[in-house]
Image (cartoon, rainbow, N blue to C red):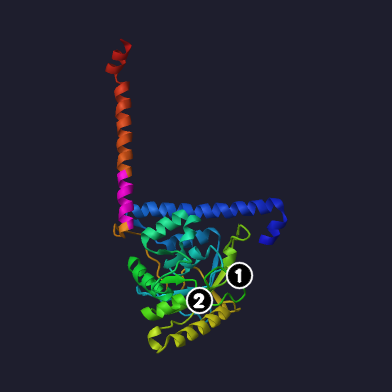
Amino acid sequence: LTSYCRSLPFLAMASKAAFFAYLLTVQASCFVSFILQLLGVQVSHGLVAAGLLKLLGTRFGTAINASEVLDAARPVVYLSNHRSWGDFWTDAALLGGPSFISRALVAAGIPFTAVWGSTSGWLWFFARGATHKEGAVAWMKNFLAERITGFPQKGVVIYPEGTRSLLPEGLPLKMGALSAAYQLQWPVQVVITTNKECVTAERDLAVNFGTLCVSNVSQVVDPRRFESLEGFLEVVKEIWRKTWTEAYGPEFLLRNEACLPGGKLAKLHFSLAGSWRLQLMRVLFFTSLALLIRRLWQRRETGEAEASPEVKRENGR
């Protein structure tokens, strides 16, 4: 459909307009969710992401031999394939609103998502290319251990390929985060989903409607069962390849909901808890709101005073 649209100038223009309109819708949804969060109304980003996919009529399938998602309010690393910008909200919907690790540069392209996610604790930014005197793996271990405390009720999605790829079998896995997960003794689960690059095709500046995304979820790999890091990494790489192959296979079952079996989507609830960043934002928000209300009230009083009969008679003299 995308290639056909590009062949016709009018349809190509409409396709690009739909793409940017969708991105604006994503940011508007995040902005509204952030304001609600400041007011104490907690909206799961998994719920918002599911709604965004529903706008596109995205369909969902589960591979026949898929395991259930490990979602038990404990640290777990989900290894997902990285195909598109849209992976963030696709995987958020599939996994019930987990945390994400992302380059800090991404914040420039999704500002309201960045503010909402970083103050909520589920979006963990890092500076790509930075050097660490303690070593990359030790730094990643400390980074994961620190950030999970800000959103402990969910696991974290890591894209182990390191960057987006449309290759049929993806890119070789980077071992830094996996080595850190082994040292932390966090379980790992591979989640491969097809056609994510069709939901949001940023290379073509297009979104597609009715895309079928089939997910395959591996068995849980528990590092406590391995005596060495090397053995753990070899098993993870083998399971990654197997899970990928089965995800792109012909056998799957359609499901009605975006969230995968085993995933738990948080319900809308009220809470004023949060990180110090969120509390600071709340103070600034309510202070600004109070000043605005005071200014509007003063303007109203001034207007009523000027419109009173006594003032009019005084002005007439």
Q: Position of residue 217 (x, y in %)?
A: 49, 78
Q: Residue at x 52, y 52 (%)?
A: 24
Q: Position of residue 59 (x, y in %)?
A: 55, 67
Where, by quadrant of the figure, is residue 279 drawn? Answer: bottom left
| 1 displayed left or right of 47 | right
- Quadrant of the drawing holding the N terminus: bottom right
Badge 2 is on which residue?
174
| 120 displayed left or right of 189 | left
User: Mark 1 is on which residue type?
Assistant: Leu
Instruction: Indicate which disc residue 18 carries.
Output: none
Q: Helix or strand or loop: what does disc 1 sit on?
A: loop
What is the CA distance from the residue labelled 1 to the residue labelled 2? 17 Å
Which residue occupies the extreme top position in the image?
317
Which residue occupies the extreme front position in the image?
133
Asked whether the beta carbons under mark 1 and mark 2 sit within 8 Å of each other, the answer is no
Q: Position of residue 133 (x, y in %)?
A: 40, 71
Q: Residue at x 49, y 86 (%)?
A: 234
Of residue 179 and residue 303, the one placed in the foreground of this image is: 179
Image: magenta residue range:
277-287
Where, by quadrant of the figure, is residue 299 drawn? Answer: top left
Badge 1 is on which residue?
166
User: Mark 2 is on which residue type?
Assistant: Lys
When the figure is inspected, residue 76 is found, relative to residue 311, above or below; the finding is below
- Nearest to N terminus: mark 1 or mark 2: 1
| Label 1 crowd bin: few (<14), some (14–19), many (20+), radius 10 Å | few
Q: Position of residue 249 (x, y in %)?
A: 60, 79
The verdict on residue 43 being magenta is: no
Q: Residue at x 63, y 54 (%)?
A: 15
Mark count:
2
Of residue 56 and residue 206, the one placed in the foreground of this image is: 206
Q: Helix or strand or loop: what does disc 2 sit on?
A: loop
